[in-house]
Image (spheres, rainbow, N blue to C red):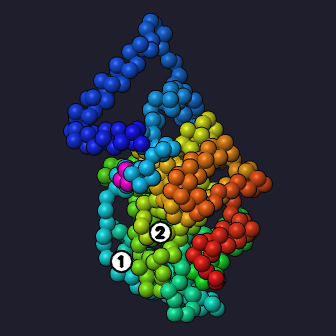
Amino acid sequence: MNQLIKTILMTSMITLISSAALAHSTAVFAHSTYDNDAPAGPDYVTQAIDSPDNSFPLFYEKLKAARMPYKLAWHDGYSPELWHSLAKAKAQEIILPYQDDTPFNPMVIDQIDRGSYIAQKIVFNISHESRVLALMLTPKGSGPFPAALFLHDHGSRFDIGKEKFVETWGDDARLSSSREWAHRYFTDRFPGDELAKRGYVVLSIDALGWGDRSVAGFRTDSQQALASNLFNLGTSFAGIIALDDLRAAKFLANRPQVDQSRVASVGFSMGAFRSWQVAALSEDITASVVDSWMGTMKGLMVPGNNQLKGQSAFTMLHPYMARYLDYPDVAAIAAPKPMLVFAGGLDPLFPVDSVQNAFDKLHRVWRANGAEDKLHTQIWPNKGHIFTADMQDAAFNWLDQQFAVNQ
């Protein structure tokens, strides 16, 4: 408790210091801390980067040891309420580029009957800058119904986004691409449609760069220029995606057919990152399903890991997060909301040790909140980076239990 209070007081004091004075004091501190270790003599580095492909600094171990302090990370003994307030405020400051309360002004432009539910193409203002097309599935009946915001993966497949989770219509090219994706990752299913059959309102959106929010020819190595341009425009690639997800959550929660007390986020891969992130930051999300994206920062920042490829990392890169919070700390801001997190024991992108360390942190926070029964973590030993039918069934059965569906 004393450590948390000290951290709170320190954070409050820092906000009163001008940015120039803070930069000066930080520089002085860093200089004085390493004076005794400073090398001398004629020797100098002749290589500082591991390869032109990964571009990983050879001094990364020193950076990990000294520049990733996680000042606001959870520690046992903290007050859950105090930590939640402080950690959430810092996460919002780092992740969200600005606030947006633009009226949604939705309009349905097409719909089809799928038996037990109606599929709609709905247009709304996801931000002040962007009016977008989303896919919405609504059960027949009077409602209100539980709901799920589906957040798609990365996969370096940019021609489809929202269509990865919900079967589209009226666009043969995207339908073909999405069926190929469903075959590769989802056992030939569209998970959004599967949940709609269970009586959920489903909303599936495009992240910036995917589907209708992309451009013909956009590819993996296009992302760096987009990310750079967004930084120069006063925002960030990851920040816009995060803000759009919060806006989509609010849009979904405020649909007249939706029970606001039962709104989940569901994501696979990059979408899983987005799922725990929106669950942490949005009051509109009351539960989350996370598949194939959880680990510790240091556990993922190792030579050869996929996160080091650069281009795709920009969609999940929030500068300076490591100064304050690790990935599981951000996800744990969602506590005590129900959260399910799956990982594959054979997933090459997320080393099992890193995943397990993250799971341990999550359980400690939910336990401190008296809600460990609301957190389900599981490593599927024979699964890779995937969300197969049996994983979907397990996740959706769990969600039904949390939301008391058909009980």
Q: Which residues are magenta?
A: 85-89
- Between discs 1 and 2, the one toward the N terminus: 1
Determine which residue is flagged by label 1: 104
The majority secondary structure of the magenta stretch comes to helix
Write the residue at 54% across / 34% down. Answer: 56
Residue 97 position by quadrant: bottom left
Name the one closer to the observer, 331 or 247.
331
Locate the C terminus and report the quarter of the image it occupies.
Answer: bottom right
Write the residue at 60% across / 36% down. Answer: 302
Residue 253 magenta-highlighted? no
- Which secondary structure lies at badge 1? loop
Q: Is residue 351 visible?
A: no
Up/down of 329 relative to 152, above or below: above
- Which secondary structure lies at badge 2? loop
In front: label 1 or label 2: 2
Determine which residue is flagged by label 2: 285
Residue 106 position by quadrant: bottom left
